[in-house]
Amino acid sequence: MSAFHVRRRRVAVVWRTLAAIALTVFFLFPIYWLFMISFKTAEEIFAFPPRWWPSRLQFDNYAVLFKDGDATTVWNSLVIASASTVLAMVLGTLCAYSLARFRTGGEHLSNWIISQRMVPPIAVVFPIFLIYVLFGWVDTYLGLILLYTAFNLPYVIWMMRGYILDIPISLEEAARVDGCTRWQVLWKVVFPMARAGLFATAILTFVFAWNEFLFALVLTRTEVTTYTVQVTHYFGGQSGFWAKISAMSVLGTLPIFVVVAFMQRYLVRGISLGAVKG
Amino acid sequence: MADLRITGLHKHFGNVHAVRGVDLQIADGEFTVLVGQSGCGKSTLLRAIAGLEDIDAGTIAIGGNVVNDDPPHRRDIAMVFQNYALYPYMTVFENIAFGLRARGTPGAEVQTKVQQTARLLAIDHLLARHPRQLSGGQLQRVAIGRAIVRDARLYLFDEPLSNLDAQLRDEMRGEIKRLHQELNKTMVYVTHDQIEAMTMADRIVLMRDGRVEQQGAPLDLYERPATRYVAGFLGSPPMNFIEATLSSRDGGVHLSDGSVLELPAARLQRVGDGHGDRAVVLGVRPEHISRAAVNGLRPGVVAHLAQINLVQPTGARTYATFGLGGTAVVAELQAHDVSQPGERVELAIDMNRAVLIDPSTERVIS
C-alpha cells in the first residue's frame, strides 16, 4: 500500500473518531446537564453565563425530596413497573408458547392481539377511569399493575412468540421423549433457549411501565403517585423547581441505568434476534 | 427392552392420509428399518410411536401395553433426531445426562452412565465441550449417546445420518450396527436410503403412500420382491424393467425388438399355463447380466448380443448400458469386460433370477 493510501486511511479514521465524539457529546449532554443541575444551588442553576459544573457537590436537592417524602414516588414506580413486568412476562410467555406451538386461535390471533397495542391510550383513558372508580381501583397499586400488565401483554406475546418460533421444535420433542412434561420442557428448554429474548422483552416492558405518564396521571392521587407524575408537580411558581425536577429525574433515571447496564448483553442480543426473525 | 406391536394405524394431516392402516410387529431386540421415499409416511409412523403425533385410529403397544394415550415422557423410549436436537446451551456431558436427570436418576449413577456411554462412542474427550464446538460426526455421536445412555424400552432413529457427508455416513452406519449388536436393544430406524436399510436392518419395512408395501429380511426383499415398486426401490443401480410378452407356446419372453429370452421350464409352469400370451414386465438386476462365458451357458441363462451405448467404470465394477426391448438396460460387469461405447459384446442374462411382473397389478408373478 502506498504512503498516500496509508495517510488517507488515517485521515478517515480521525474524521470518523471526531464525528463519533461529537455525536456522543450531543446525545449525552442533556443527561450530563440533568445530573449537574441536580447538584447545583439555585444561584448556580440560574447563573449567566451558565456554569458547566457545580462549585461543590451538594445533595440538598435530594435531601429535600427524601424529607418531603417525594422520593417514595420512585419506590411506587419501582413496585408498579416490576410487578407488572413480572406478570406480563409470565402470562405473555405462556400465551406466546400456546400461539407458537399449539396454533391457538388459528393463524391470525397474534395479529389481533398486537393490534390492541395500536389503540391510542388517550382514547381509552376515561372509560378505564370510570371502570376503576366503579371497582375502587383508583390510586391503588393493584389498579396500575393490572393496567400496565394489560397494556404490555400484547407486546410480550408478540415478541415472545417470535423468539419461541425460532427455537427448533425438535429440541422440545427431544426433551419430551427424554422424559420431560410440557412444563418441564418450558422450564428446561424454552426458557434457556429464549433467554436473550426474555430479558430484552422484560427490559422494554419494564421501561414502558417505568416511563408511563398518562394513565398514572389520571389514575393516581396521593397514595401510589409514580415519579413521572411527581416530576410534573414541581412546575410552578417556586424558584427551586428546576433543582427538584432534576434531582427527581436523576432518581427516576438511575434504576433504568442499572437495569440496562446489567442486562445490556441480553438486550443487544435479544433485539437483534428479533430483528432477523422472518 | 420390549417388543412393539402396531395394528391398524391411521394418521391424517388435514386432507392428507399420511399413514393408511399400518400393521407391524417388531420383536424384542430386533433392528427394524422403515424405508421409503420422502412422504411415504415412515417418519410420521416413527413419530406416532414416539407419541409426538396423535393417531386417528389403531393401537400402538410397547411391551404389551397400549400407549396410544400416553404422552412421550411416559412411553419410556429414546430417540435420535435427524438434526441432532442437542441443547446448545449445555455441554456434551449435560446433553447426554439430560434424559437421566429428567427421570430423577441419582447423580453418581448419571456420572457413571454418561462416562460409559461416552467411552462406547469414543467421545469421552469431548464431554466438557458445547455442541457448537463439535463437528457433524461428533454431534451425531452425542445425539446417539443421549439416546442410548438410558435403558429405554425402545430406541427410535429418525434419519440420523442424512446430514452427514458420504464417508462419515458409511462410518456411522457401521457404528450404529455395532451398537445394536453390543446392546441388543429393540431399535426402529427410519431412512430413505436403501443402502442404509439393506446394510443395517434385521428386518426392512418398505413403505409406500402410507402403507407397508412389503416387509422381511433384507435379502428376502431383495431376492423375492412382492411388487415392482419393491424390486425397483432396493438395489443400486436399480433393477431394469422391460415390457414384454410371455408366450405359453414357446416359453419365451418376447421383447418389442424381436428378441426372445427363454424362461426356465420350472418357472414357466408357474406363470405361463393356460394364459396363452400375456403382457408382462421383465425385471432383471444389473448384476444378473454378465459377459457370456466362452465355455457355454448355465441352464436358465440366455445369451444376448448387445451393442454397448454407455460405459461407466466405478473401479471394481463397470456399468454398461445397452438397448434391450426398446429400453436402456444397465449391466453390472467386471471392471474390464467392456472398454468403450459402440463395442458389441455377448452378454448372459440370468433368467433364473429375473422377475416377471403383471403390469396391471404391478405384482411380481414369478
Image (cartoon, coloured by chain):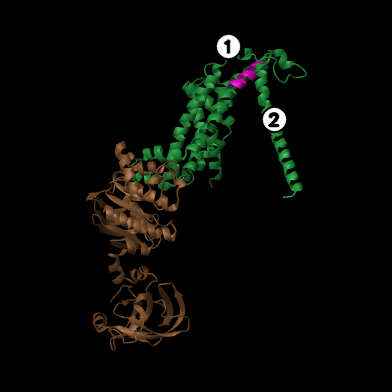
Chain colours: A green, B brown
Residue B52 visible in rendering: no
Residue that badge 2 annotates: A25
Amino acid type, callout 1: Asp
Circles 1 and 2, Cβ within 8 Å, touching? The answer is no
Q: Residue furthest left?
A: B64
Q: Is residue A95 above or below residue A257?
A: below
Judging depth in this view, the residue of B92 and A135 nearest the camera is: B92
Q: Main secondary structure of the magenta part?
A: helix
Q: Name the image quarter holding residue A100.
A: top left
- Whether the magenta-drawn stretch holds residue A247 is answered as yes
Residue A107: percent from left, percent from top: 47, 47
Disc 2 crowd, CA 10 A, few/some/many (<14, 14-19, 20+): few
- Specify the segment rendered in magenta: A243-251
Q: Is residue B294 above or below residue B225?
A: below
Q: Kindly identify which numbered label has been placed on residue A68.
A: 1
Q: Under tag 2, what secondary structure?
A: helix
Residue B284: percent from left, percent from top: 35, 77
- Whether the magenta-drawn stretch holds residue A209 is answered as no
Residue B101: percent from left, percent from top: 33, 39
Mark 1 or mark 2: which is in front?
2
Mark 1 vs mark 2: which is more N-terminal?
2
The residue that appears at 37% across and 87% down in the rendered structure is B259
**Chain ID, mark 1:** A
Residue B152 visible in rendering: yes
The residue that appears at 54% across and 39% down in the rendered structure is A269
Q: Name the image quarter holding residue B233.
A: bottom left
Residue A199: percent from left, percent from top: 50, 34
Determine whether, in the image, residue A133 is placed left or right of residue B145.
right
Q: Are marks 1 and 2 on the same chain?
A: yes
Judging depth in this view, the residue of B58 and A128 nearest the camera is: B58
CA distance for labels 1 and 2: 35 Å
Q: Is residue B319 above or below residue A28?
A: below
